């Protein structure tokens, strides 16, 4: 790429950027498709690369080999997309294995959530009194550790220790629900 064209792109010249886009777009799509085996997805990846170039045009270094940068970026985004697809596929397998056939997911979700809520209440009730008080102040009253320490007239370290203990109990007791929690967030 000529230095003049590069400078114009860095200054925000859309016409110059379009020239760059037209010059490399098909080559980059073909390159991305070798990884992805999906023309539409390859086009999306390449468009993302160009969007990133445009958004960061003022940071581009004219001394770097720009063509290499484009193709390395395309390769990296393609590999990231493959990894994302692999994770998504794993989650779908977990969902299929987790939910019984013939049941609606929404019904199953609400039952699991209700069961989790009941379990959480039981865990809170079983915490030692001071630990429970600190946990409730932190999580249900949204108070910072320092605020809790001041209000209860105890050290910040004590609050941190009690929160660590409470969270350790939750992790241990709710381990069986972690798949459901992960699926809910993704």
Image: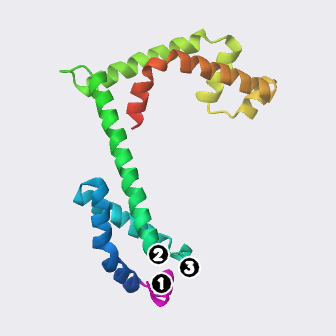
Label 3 neighbour load within 10 Å: few <14, some 14-19, many 20+ = few
Label 2 neighbour load within 10 Å: few <14, some 14-19, many 20+ = some
Chief secondary structure of the magenta portion: helix
Name the foreground residue: 115 vs 63.
63
Q: In which quarter of the image is the N terminus?
A: bottom left
- Up-down: is 174 above or below 29? above
Please provide the residue range marked out in magenta: 1-13
Residue holding disc 3? 63
Disc 2 secondary structure class:
helix
Residue holding disc 1? 6
> Residue 157: within the magenta?
no
* Residue shown at the point (24%, 19%) measured from the top left: 100
Question: Could you tell me residue 26's position as x and y percent?
Answer: 27, 72
Image-based side of 161 in relation to 113, left or right = right
Disc 3 secondary structure class:
loop
Dot placed on the residue nearer the N-terminal end, 1 or 2: 1
Dot placed on the residue nearer the N-terminal end, 1 or 3: 1
- Up-down: is 16 above or below 129? below
Question: Could you tell me residue 138's position as x and y percent?
Answer: 64, 28
Task: Report the mark closest to the observer, 1 or 3.
Answer: 3
What kind of colouring is applied to the model shown? rainbow
> Residue 3: within the magenta?
yes
Does the residue at mark 2 contact the one at mark 3 (Cβ under 8 Å)?
A: no
Distance in Å between CA atoms under marks 1 and 3: 10 Å
Question: Could you tell me residue 98's position as x and y percent?
Answer: 31, 22
Question: Could you tell me residue 84's position as x and y percent?
Answer: 37, 45
Distance in Å between CA atoms under marks 1 and 2: 9 Å
Q: Which mark is residue 139?
A: none
* Residue shown at the point (69%, 34%) measured from the top left: 144
**Displayed quadrant of residue 139:** top right
Residue holding disc 2? 66
- Up-down: is 44 above or below 22? above
């Amino acid at each position: 790429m000529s230095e003049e064209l590069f400078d114009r792109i860095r200054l925000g010249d859309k016409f110059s950027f379009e020239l760059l886009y037209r010059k490399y777009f098909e080559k980059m799509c073909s390159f991305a498709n070798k990884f992805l085996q999906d023309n539409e997805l390859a086009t999306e990846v390449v468009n993302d690369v160009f969007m990133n170039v445009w958004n960061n045009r003022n940071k581009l270094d004219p001394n770097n080999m720009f063509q290499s940068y484009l193709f390395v970026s395309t390769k990296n985004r393609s590999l990231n997309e493959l990894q994302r697809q692999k994770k998504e596929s794993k989650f779908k397998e977990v969902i299929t294995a987790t939910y019984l056939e013939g049941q609606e997911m929404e019904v199953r979700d609400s039952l699991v959530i209700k069961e989790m809520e009941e379990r959480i209440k039981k865990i809170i009730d079983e915490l030692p009194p001071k630990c429970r008080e600190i946990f409730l102040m932190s999580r249900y009253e949204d108070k910072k550790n320092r605020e809790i320490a001041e209000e209860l007239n105890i050290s910040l370290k004590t609050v941190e220790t009690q929160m660590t203990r409470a969270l350790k109990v939750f992790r241990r007791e709710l381990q069986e629900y972690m798949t459901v929690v992960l699926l809910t967030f993704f």
